[in-house]
Amino acid sequence: MASVDGIATGFNTTQMVASLMAAERVPQNQLRDQKNILSRQQSAYSDLKSAYSKVSDRLDTLKTADTWQRRTATSSDTKVAATVNSDAAIGQFTFTVDQTAAAHAVYTADTVAADDIVSDTGTYAGMTATEAVTAINNDDTLDTTAALIQTAPGEYRIQLSAKNTGSDSSVGVDASEFDRLTSGFTTLTTGRDAQISVSGDNPLVITSNTNTFDDVMPGLDITVTERSTDAVTVSVTEDVDGLADDMAALFDDLIGALNRVDSLTETNGTTSSLLSSASVLRRSENNLRNAVFNEVSSSTLSTASFAGVDLSREGTISFDKQKFIDAYNGDPQAVKDLFFSDDTTQETVFSRLDTELQAATNFTSGYLSTSEDAVEQRVREIDDQIAAWDIRLDKREANYRRTFTSLETALSQLQQQSNWLSSQIANLPSYGPIGGT
């Protein structure tokens, strides 16, 4: 219903309704404020769950036997690359590179122009040199690549190369396919195997049809790129530095997650953080610290503080990579027993961390998941209440407008009647005093 502003009363009815509705909306606005806080809490739980999951993912990488048997390989010559896996034995392998692998390659003895027809019969009948090269490159069954090489202005030779290297490599196109080029093929490179040899009274020769020698020793692959006259030594050692880097990444993520808990639960005399009332997070923080620093009975080191993990008086965790490396080099088994065990029933730092992280992040029962779900449910309930208030307020505003409009109309009618009466009284005849003077 449209409002009638000030016809009779002079009041701004629209403004009065707006003021009344502002007061009516206070409870709904309080619900909106509450929803905003809950939405931020929901987001905070989700962020924490992501932070905890990131730590859990790091932990999954470190909770494997291969991680604790990691090897690294170094070569004394930049022309030889080496890779290893956890099965590689620690030691050295010395050899010389006698030759690298090559693919068989030929070229046409006759020269042609790029648009010369190269064959009258067979697969490439009627094709120009350019078209024949394209056809060969598009035919995967040939295991051959082709190229048109300009040897003098306007003069080309067709070069064909086997895709595979090794003494058995061959070109998949016969010279007879180019019957207009009567001189046939000239060999550019004969296919050959790569060869390395271990020196001695009777040198040990090792061959490969590629430049990579797989499992030249168990778990060790080497790749050669050039012939060498000097001996090359490949050394296989424990990759302690790589392990320490992974440990540092784990504790960096853990420290980040704990700092996030601190910021969300911090409180002082005047202010409280977003999740300051969530006692489960403070318990979680304590449990994670205890998981790291409580004694591990299966290791002679007893606690992580002897392997580079420290706890300050303020409860802050830190990781010293060099201290970890020194501890590992001093007693590898003790450090491994401290953090990880192949026996899943054995309690270690990692097993305790894993238990706490799973208790937090499990999709259905983790306390971060259930807390987030509970807040989300409360947000939905408040959304329903806000929607109900919208309906209620719309009706209330309509009632106010109807009441004010009716009042204005009634007062207007009374004013009209008053004006009519006044005009009637004014038009009555005037009589002098009775009896005259």
Image: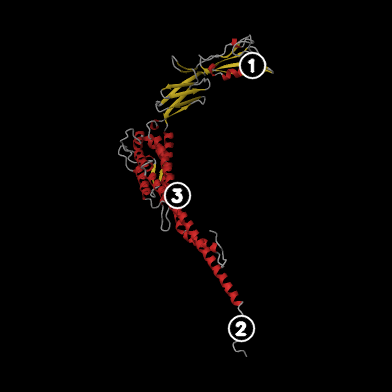
Residue 364, numbered label: none
> Residue at label 2?
431
Marks 3 and 2: which is nearer the front?
A: 2
Quarter of the image for residue 89 reads top left
Can you say whether 314 is above or below 56 in the image? Answer: below
Can you say whether 333 is above or below 382 in the image? Answer: above
The amino acid sitting under disc 3 is: Ser
Kind of element beneath mark 3: helix
Kind of element beneath mark 1: helix
Residue 39, numbered label: 3
Marks 1/2: CA–CA distance: 134 Å
* Residue toward you, 226 or 369: 369
Marks 1 and 2: which is nearer the front?
A: 2
Q: Position of residue 354 (x, y in %)?
A: 36, 39
Q: Is residue 15 left or right of residue 381?
A: right
Kind of element beneath mark 2: loop
Quarter of the image for residue 217 reads top left
Marks 3/1: CA–CA distance: 70 Å
> Which residue is drawn at the image coordinates 61% and 77% (left, top)?
426
Q: Position of residue 302 (x, y in %)?
A: 32, 40
The amino acid sitting under disc 1 is: Ala
Say if residue 33 shows up in the picture.
Answer: no
Q: Residue furthest top?
A: 182
Discs 3, 2 touching: Cβ within 8 Å: no
Say if residue 344 shows up in the picture.
Answer: yes
> Residue at label 1?
129
* Residue toward you, 309 or 188: 188
* Residue toward you, 175 or 214: 175
* Residue toward you, 15 or 293: 15
